[in-house]
Image (cartoon, grey):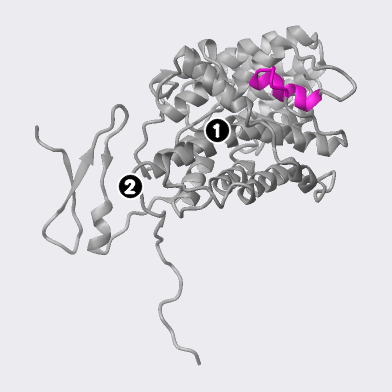
Amino acid sequence: MTKKTAELHLSDTTTPLDLPVISGTVGPDVVDVRSLVSKGIFTFDPGFVSTASCESEITYIDGDNGILLHRGYPIEQLAEKASFLDTCFLLLNGELPTRQEKADFENTIRYHTMVDQQIHEFFKGFPRNAHPMAMLCGAVGGLSAFYHENLDIEDADHRKQAAHRIIAKMPTLAAMVYKHGVGQPFMYPQNDMGFSANFLHMMFGTPCEPPKVSKTLSKAMDVIFTLHADHEQNASTSTVRLAGSSGANPYACIASGIAALWGPSHGGANEAVLEMLYEINDEKNISNFILKAKDKDDPFRLMGFGHRVYKNFDPRATVMRKICDDVLEELGVKDDPLFRIARKLEQIALEDEYFIDRKLYPNVDFYSGIILKAIGIPTNLFTVIFATGRTPGWISHWDEMLSSPYKIGRPRQLYKGHARRDMP
């Protein structure tokens, strides 16, 4: 079989450069430009939107057709038939767990959920009004101090243990972030509760009462975590890989991913949905905001509609819509003014030709924002929830990179500054 190549013609040379073309399992072919540096040439791709920075077997996205696969499995099927911990196991190991593997994995995660008591003291250094992502970033980075001396990132078993620890401890830390902000005592994880139920218990439970978590809300939380588990080479995942390529401690690498996710252009989308709903304020104002959204000269945007990657529909949104109905029914808040505004916007987006023609369908952030608000999670904690769900994706990419030969990340630049000049 003849290997595919691409020819690069440079105006100052007569012989074209032959560049190998690499094909993946599915998706577009990739032109291998690694040899260009030896010719004194770089490619220019701000934002790396046309650059494959690595090979990966974890997640595949086809944005044009609304497809998201984890290890080959459609996200819709995972959300319906698998738990979040099943999905974690899949991302880490490449296959869904057997019954025994599932039991062993859940048991491992269960007994890694506690954090060192000194972490409790660590939170005392944060003011009550500190941003939740600042606290989470600091606390996760602080885990490096507890798991460093005996951690060999070149050892596959050590990497696996680090992955288990960080997946297990993230919901504990996320709940501690919330509890510190509201001035309530930290709640210890319960070994007889499932992953997502335990998280909600640590968030909203108190020492005054025995654990009591709704199965509907626990299921909703589990699905939210699952739908955010991984999303290919996004900004935060790429940050984790870049930090990991230097050989950094894995907890520091995850902290770098949290820092990247903090940005409003990445992890703040579901928070922006709630802020938009508050701005609209009343159903009678919806038509005016729709007109503003359609006006190309108006900077206002409807948040939670359309997606940078998914040019058709977000496959996660269909799952989230059903969960949203279940949660609102369970909590009896369907008549809440905020949720009525959200439902009206949803109806318009699904029926109005302007939105249909532009494929501006409600995305996962639209529904997750509504669900989290209904559950009682503060808006400024939404990105912490996102980070908790995304952790298995981050750590799986970190482990995958270190499992194969890799190079430290070193992007190049197109220099536009002064040429050499001498001091006067």
Residue 109 location (% of width, % of height): 59, 27
Question: Outermost residue toward the right?
Answer: 208
Residue 354 visible somewhere in the drawing: no
Query: Please, what secondary structure does the residue beneath circle 2 have?
Result: loop
Provide the residue designation for mark 2. Answer: 405
Residue range corresponding to the magenta coloring:
190-204
Q: Nearer the viewer, residue 249 or 364?
A: 249
Amino acid tagged 2: Pro
Q: Is residue 77 above or below residue 18?
A: above
* Label located before the other in sequence (1 or 2): 1
Residue 113 shown left or right of residue 374 in the figure:
left
Q: Is residue 114 above or below residue 12?
A: above
Residue 269 location (% of width, % of height): 64, 33
Q: Nearer the viewer, residue 86 or 374?
A: 86
Rendering quarter of residue 98: top left
Residue 124 shown left or right of residue 322 in the figure:
right
Tag shown at residue 231: none
Amino acid tagged 1: His
Residue 23 location (% of width, % of height): 25, 34
Residue 47 shown left or right of residue 367 in the figure:
left
Q: Is residue 43 above or below residue 318?
A: below
Residue 322 visible somewhere in the drawing: yes
Provide the residue designation for mark 1. Answer: 164
